[in-house]
Image: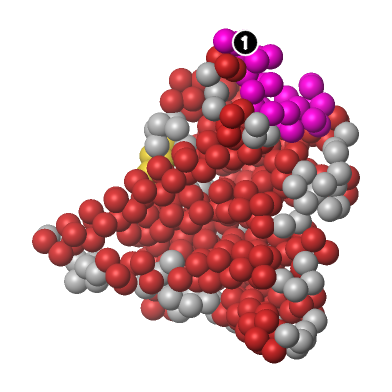
Amino acid sequence: MKPAYAKSVIPSKYMKALKKYRAEGDDLSITRKYILNHFYEWLMRNVVPISIAPNMITLIGFILMLLSSTITAIHSPNLTERLPGWVFLLNATCLFLYQTLDNLDGKQARKTGTSSPLGELFDHGCDALASTLGTFCWLATCAQGGGATSYLIMLNACIPFVFATWEEYYIGGLYLGYINGPVEGILGVIMTQLLSFYYGAEFFHQNFSTFVYDFISKDASKLLGSSVASQPLWLCLCSLTLCLASINVLLNTINVVSKIRENKIRPTNPDAETSILNTVTKLVPFIILLGGNLAWIIFSTTGIMKQHPYLLFYCSGISFGYLASNITLSYLLKSPLKSFSIINLPLCFALLNLAVTHYTGKLFIEERFFLYICAVWVTVIYYNFVMSVCHQVSSYLGFFVLSIKPKPAKINQE
């Protein structure tokens, strides 16, 4: 029986690549290798039941992130309100559980012999959405409201994810460094929530010099320049993460460029990419999405993000999850990437409306109208994508999405 969402997302000619799937990549995180991995192995031996499907583990982690973000939004609807202490503790707990479950799903897949391309896509898809959800707790901590600053903080989490996924497509695997976002980055956010829980919501709003004076050294605080010393602690941390993210993005780019040059000299197959320009154009959908939303926020004549911060984040987050998942899907299918995505259409019309408004000096169409259209549009497209891909891949490979298919009973022959 065909489901209502049965519009095929995957062309049939690419389906055969799924049967050649083999997980590629490595996580070199020092923290994971020497500390967390021992904890994960203990959980696998003593806590995680053999009957639970890897994708179910992933989904539970994502639901916890959704719960945390929803409660944060309720208590900080404008991203300016001070959160009660227990919300910070909840955020830290949910983030830690999400990170833990995100590491257990792969171990469970290997343990149960259920590793699959859909498992990787399911995991990466949830990670893409969680990269937006995970910033909500930090945005509520910064309490900068709905504006360009808050959106830039979100980009600090999204852009490294884009480039890591882009790199995976071209070099053939996801390789994470010794210090990376999924491990040390999440642990850093967890620490900010625990500090806010213990010291109060104002902790990250003190001047950097005050923090250094009270928590590090009285003498060290005197060495700070006035421009740095007067900045709030949250801004200094954002600047630090921006530097680390920029280094990762640079390394991703270097790896892709090196691979393209290698393909030119020693092509491994006739479909190997040999054009650096062509690889860059595959980032255009993300540039339109992330850059377009930022432009909309900055040049909005009605303060669209201040009026509807979470709705704009929702549209951006769902669109980001869709685009990132499409790169992962193309990687698994060995299919070409596209330089444009229909999920960005309402945003393009919203930007056109904004340009006409600025040119004529009169509001052409209410901006919130486009935001509502965007919300419906991205929901329908993403829902169809998720359900259709899950249906196609699970049917083709012959397994269940959220449960482990029972093995057929052996018949004794006498």
Q: Nearer the viewer, residue 83 or 168?
A: 83
Left or right placement of residue 361 versus residue 340 in this view: right
User: Could one spot residue 344 in this view of the protein?
Assistant: yes
Q: Nearer the viewer, residue 87 or 2?
A: 87
CA neighbours of label 1 inside 10 A, class few (<14), some (14 to 19), many (20+): some
Task: Indicate the secondary structure of the residue bearing disc 1.
Answer: helix
Left or right placement of residue 379 versus residue 164 in this view: right
Q: Is residue 91 above or below residue 77?
A: above
State which quadrant residue 373 falls in. Answer: bottom right
Q: Is residue 137 above or below residue 39?
A: below
Where residue 277 appears, x then y in whole percent? 30, 70
* Residue at the (68%, 52%) spot, across then down: 150
What residue would you read off at disc 1?
Answer: 218
Where residue 110 appears, x then y in whole percent? 47, 40
Q: Nearer the viewer, residue 161 or 396?
A: 161
Q: Which residues are magenta?
A: 191-219
Where residue 194 appears, x then y in whole percent? 73, 26
Q: Is residue 185 covered in magenta?
A: no
